[in-house]
Image (cartoon, grey):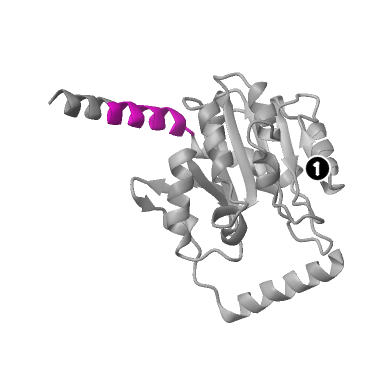
Amino acid sequence: MASLKCLVIFCLLHLCVRNIQGQVNPSALAKMIQYFDDNVQPKTKIGTNAQYAIAISVPRYLCTNDQSQIEDVFSREEAQSVKDYITQGQTCVRCSSSQNVIATRPNAKTKEHAEHILLFPTGNSPMDTLLKNTDQNNCVVFYSYNSPCVTKCIRGEDNIFPGLQNWKNVRNEGMNVFVFEDLWKDADKTIADDFKRIDQLVPLYRCASENAMECQNCVNGNTVNPFCLPKKKSILLHLQEMLLSVIELFLEI
């Protein structure tokens, strides 16, 4: 009987920690991601949005109050500087004057993905450097323009889960958020289980814009929000994406 009571208490404490982590205002998060879109988002050689990842440590109110302004702690000038830095193929490790940001694009030579670059090697990664210099009361937002790819970032040898586990271990009771905007081209309905695995470590959100930026949490209990899952694409859209990929690959050669 005593062991059962201990188990119940443990579960309640776990739920409490998850609640602390998840107290993010989606509207405040949407303002932050829109700011990244407007001021940091790099472009490919054909002018489309390029994959990149950025993590930022900000006072908690910037993740909870939708009247707050991220520009107060990460100016447009700093954002432009970070954009220039990663566009040149460099990894930003607290390279802004506020020293609250890490960011990178994928490595074109090694093919290492942006999320992996920021999270590894565990214990000595750009993310570790950011967290070591972060107030425990801050909110840490990790944003990847594309969702983690299935073949490398989730199910391959370079999967990001050890990096996410390391992040959780360092800030187990902190306000942490993993955000993506666009779904990577290899995503299908089976990615729902992978999103659950991510959310068990760090609350997972998707932010997307049609008329206005909107953010929603991706996992509720054991259910994955359809907002975060890929919709069936037309053959024409598939062909268009394939053509763009071929053009971008040709321009990189």
Residue closest to the eye, 31 or 10 = 10
Residue 175 as seen in the image, left or right of residue 121: left
Q: Which amino acid type corresponds to the residue marked 1 in the rendered image? A: Lys
Which is more toward the observer, 30 or 162? 162
Vertical comparison of 30 with 146: above or below: above
**In the rendered image of this protein, does residue 26 appear above or below residue 247?**
above
Which residue matches tag 1? 83
Please give left or right for residue 53 compared with residue 219 in the image. Answer: right
How crowded pointer 1 is (Cα within 10 Å; few <14, some 14-19, many 20+) is rated as many
- Residue ranking furthest to the left: 1
In the image, residue 74 above or below residue 163: above
- Disc 1 on helix, strand or loop? helix
Residue under the point 80% across and 31% down: 95
Q: Main secondary structure of the magenta part?
A: helix
Image coords of residue 100 (percent x, y): 71, 27
* Above-or-below relation of 162 to 44: above
The answer to whether residue 23 is magenta is: yes
Residue 89 located within the stretch drawn in magenta: no
Q: Which residues are magenta?
A: 10-24
Q: Residue at position x 75%, y 61% from top? A: 48
Position of the N terminus by quadrant = top left
Judge whether residue 218 can be spotted in this image.
no
Q: Residue at x 62, y 52 (%)?
A: 158
Residue pictured at 35% horizontal, 30% vertical:
14
Locate residue 33, reporting x and y percent.
63, 42
Q: Position of residue 168 (x, y in %)?
A: 51, 32
Residue 182's x, y, as percent? 60, 56
Residue 118 lies in quadrant? top right
Quarter assignment of residue 91: top right
